[in-house]
Structure formats: structure tokens, C-alpha cells
Amino acid sequence: MNIKNIIRTVLIMILLLFIGEYLPILSTVIVGIPVSLLVLYKKENFKPVILSIGIFSFVIYFSFGFFNMLFVLIFTVLNISVLIYSDKNKLSALITQILLFLAILISLTFTIYVITTINETSILEMFKTSLKESENILASNSLLAGSEFNINEVINQILSIIPFMVILLSSMNAIVMYFLARYVLKKMNFEVLEINNLSDFKLPMHFVYGITFILFLSYIVGAMNIVSFNSISLNVILIMLYIFAFQGAAVLSYFLDKKNVAKIIKITLILILMLFQGIFILAIVGWLDMIFNFRRVKKSE
């Protein structure tokens, strides 16, 4: 067991956590925590990984408190387990990213559940309190003077899409973690599986049936007054928008590749469209591709 490797790994993990904690705009850097443990595992074995997680958890508890320690510990253990399992069994890129998505989603959901249970409140009340505090800060600094800003409307809009926000955050972090792990391992001359180009991606045909079934269940839940149907359907539609937009991006990538457009230009164009209102255009293209199969890609069953 190489102590230097363990110390180096723990220091990297702590640094990434501090960056994510104090610079929220860079919070995605915490995906590097499981990746650093994966590198340690490739160099050593399970024991140094377990020891590093133990030391890391101890530092988090005394630096950030119990709830932060709980989330980071669950997040780290679940994701490093997925990365190691995927590496040992040579899982495909898609399967690995789905497993990472589930690991992150479980981490967020379980932590929220524990916090709300201990504090005897709901996630909606927590968000309302947080947003109301933001309103008070703005009001105290006269930043809302003379404006028609209505914090209650903003709160209601944000609260209505919390499930979508959690799913989107989990999926984006899963994608970043997968490609970061792949990049780091390649740089360190470890073997990695070849993956298909974005232009080859196509949703399975039964995806449409699955979405239809989800919408049907949403209607049933809404009809039973368990949760607002409008709220559920809005979240499902937003999720569908991003999934179809991803396929639309694959179609765009396919035609840009045929025109021999430079990779950096292709990536920049797709990111701009995904981040702004062009996502609606990509979603429509992706939906039409399900019907007309523009690229003549063999349809998945």
C-alpha cells in the first residue's frame, strides 16, 4: 500500500470539494472525486480506496458538517462502485452513464429525504425559505425598488420543475464524470473502451412507448389528486425535450461530419444550441428523426 498515493488522492478530493462548496458555479468539479479514487484503484487496489474514503469523510464532517458529509459519502461510494464495476466488466458507455446517473440521483434524493425528515419539513418548504431569504437580501439592498419582480411567481415556477432540475443535474454530472474518467485513464495510459460517435446515437424505438406510458401514469396520479397533473406533465415534457434534443444534436453532428466541419466548431455550435433556445429546434429534429430516420441508422428494438 503506497501511502503517498493515498495522501495525494485525499488532498485532491478535499481540494475539489472546497472548490465545489465555495464556488457554486464550479460545483460540477466534485465529479472528480470518484474519478480520483478510480485512478487510485487502478494503481493499487480496494483497500487504499476504502482508507481514502474514510479519511475524506472524517475531514468533511469536521469541515462542513453532517449533511454535507452524508451527501458526499453516499455520492462518492455509489459512483466509485459504478466506475470500478464498469471498468472490471467493460460496460458500454451508455450503460455506464445510466448507472452513474442513477447513483447521483439516489445520492441527491436520499440526502434530501434525510434532511427533510430530520428537520420535519418538506423539500418545497426548504426551497421556499431559501428563495424568500434571497428576496429579503434583494429588498434590503433596494434592488427590487421600482421593479415588477414577483418573488412568489418565481418560487412557484421553480418549485414546479424541481424533479426535472434534479434529473437534469444528475444526468449532466453523470456525463461529465464518465468522460472525465475516460480522459484521465487515457492520459495515464490505462486501457479504455472505444465509444461510438455522437452522430451514431439513436433512441430505442420503444422509448416513445415508455414516454406514453409515463404520461398515462402522470394523468392517473393527477386524477387521484396525489400530485398536480400539470406539475408532473411539465416535468415529463421538459425531460422529453432534453432527450429528443440530444438525438437532434446527434443528427446535426452527423451532417456536420459529412461536411468535414472542424470538431471544435461542431462542439461549440451544439453547446450553444443546447444551452439556449436552439434546444427546441434540436428537440424537433430529434423527434422527426424518430419517424423519418434521416441518417438511415438501424433502429433499435
Image: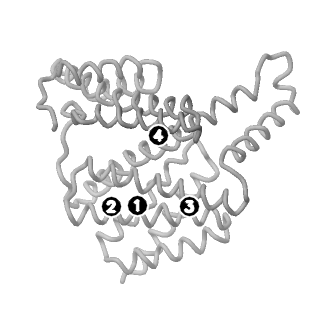
- In screen coordinates, is 29 left or right of 190? right
| Mark 4 / mark 2, whichever is N-terminal | 2
Q: Residue furthest bottom?
A: 1
Q: Is residue 80 above or below residue 234?
A: below
- Judging by the rendered image, the residue that carries numbered circle 3 is 71
Label 4, residues with CA under 10 Å away: few <14, some 14-19, many ≥20: some
Label 1, residues with CA under 10 Å away: few <14, some 14-19, many ≥20: many
Which image quadrant is residue 133 in?
Answer: top right
| Mark 3 / mark 4, whichever is N-terminal | 3
**Quadrant assignment for the N terminus:** bottom left
The residue sitting at 19% across, 24% down in the picture is: 257
Amino acid under label 4? Answer: Leu
Q: Position of residue 99 (x, y in %)?
A: 34, 54
Q: Position of residue 175 (x, y in %)?
A: 37, 45
Question: Looking at the rendered structure, which numbered label has been put on residue 168?
Answer: 4
- Judging by the rendered image, the residue that carries numbered circle 2 is 83
SS state under label 3: helix
Question: Looking at the rendered structure, which numbered label has been put on residue 79?
Answer: 1
| Contact between labelled residues 4 and 1, with CB atoms less than 8 Å apart | no
Amino acid under label 3? Answer: Phe
Colour approach in the figure: one colour
| Contact between labelled residues 2 and 1, with CB atoms less than 8 Å apart | yes
Q: CA distance from mark 2 to mark 3?
A: 18 Å
| Mark 1 / mark 4, whichever is N-terminal | 1
Q: Position of residue 215 (x, y in %)?
A: 41, 32
